[in-house]
Amino acid sequence: MAIIGVGTTLKIGGTLIGKVTNISGPSMSKETVDTTSFDNTDGYRSFIVGLKDAGTLTFTLMFDKTVYSTLKAAFEDNTAKAIEITLPDATKLTFNGFVTELPLTVPTEDKVTCDVTVKISGAVTFTPAA
C-alpha cells in the first residue's frame, strides 16, 4: 500500500529533528570485483560481490536555531550517532552515521533552509510495520 511522507519522524542521537521537509536515502550500494581471467572463453566478464556501502542520508529542514544547534553539535562530535527514521505506517530504518555537511541556504524572499548530509557507518536495519 502506498503512503505519503507526512508524519515521518527523524531522530539523531535520540533527539527528534523537527521542521524536516525532505529526506533522501539511505543510498545503499554494492561493489563488484572483476574476476575475469583467461579461462573466460565466452567473451563475458565475470564478477563477485564486494563490500556494501550504506551510503548517505540527506535531508532538508527549515531553519530552527534549536534544531540547528543539535545538528551543529553532532557535526562537531566525531562519534557516530544513532539515527532512526520512522515512516507514518510505523516502518523504521535505523543506523549509525556522522553529520558530514551542514550548509545553510539564505534566500532573499523565501525561508532559510539547511541541507544536511549524514555518512552512514555500517548496516541499515529495516523494520517493516506490523
Image (cartoon, grey):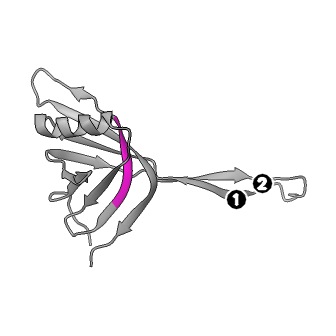
Quarter where residue 39 is shown:
bottom right
* Residue 30: assigned label: none
Residue name at image x 24 percent, y 62 percent: 86
- Magenta region: 94-100
* Residue 48: assigned label: 1
Q: Which of 34 and 14 lies nearest the eye of the viewer? A: 14
Return the x and y of residue 73 as percentages of the image width and height.
Answer: 25, 36
Residue wearing tag 2: 35
Quarter where residue 65 is shown:
top left
Can you see residue 64? no
As for residue 65 lying within the magenta part, the answer is no
Name the chief secondary structure element in magenta. Answer: strand
User: How many numbered badges does the structure rendering display?
Assistant: 2
Callout 2: SS: loop
Return the x and y of residue 41 as percentages of the image width and height.
Answer: 88, 58
Quarter of the image with the C terminus is bottom left
- Determine whether, in the image, residue 14 is placed left or right of residue 121: left
Return the x and y of residue 53 as percentages of the image width and height.
Answer: 51, 51
Judge the density around disc 2: few (<14), some (14-19), many (≥20) Cα neighbours within 10 Å.
few
Q: CA distance from mark 1 to mark 2?
A: 7 Å
The three-letter amino acid code for the residue at tag 1 is Ile
Find the residue positioned furthest to the top: 108
Q: CB atoms at circles 1 and 2 under 8 Å apart?
A: yes
The three-letter amino acid code for the residue at tag 2 is Thr
Find the residue positioned furthest to the bottom: 130
Residue name at image x 23 percent, y 69 percent: 90
Judge the density around disc 1: few (<14), some (14-19), many (≥20) Cα neighbours within 10 Å.
few
Callout 1: SS: strand
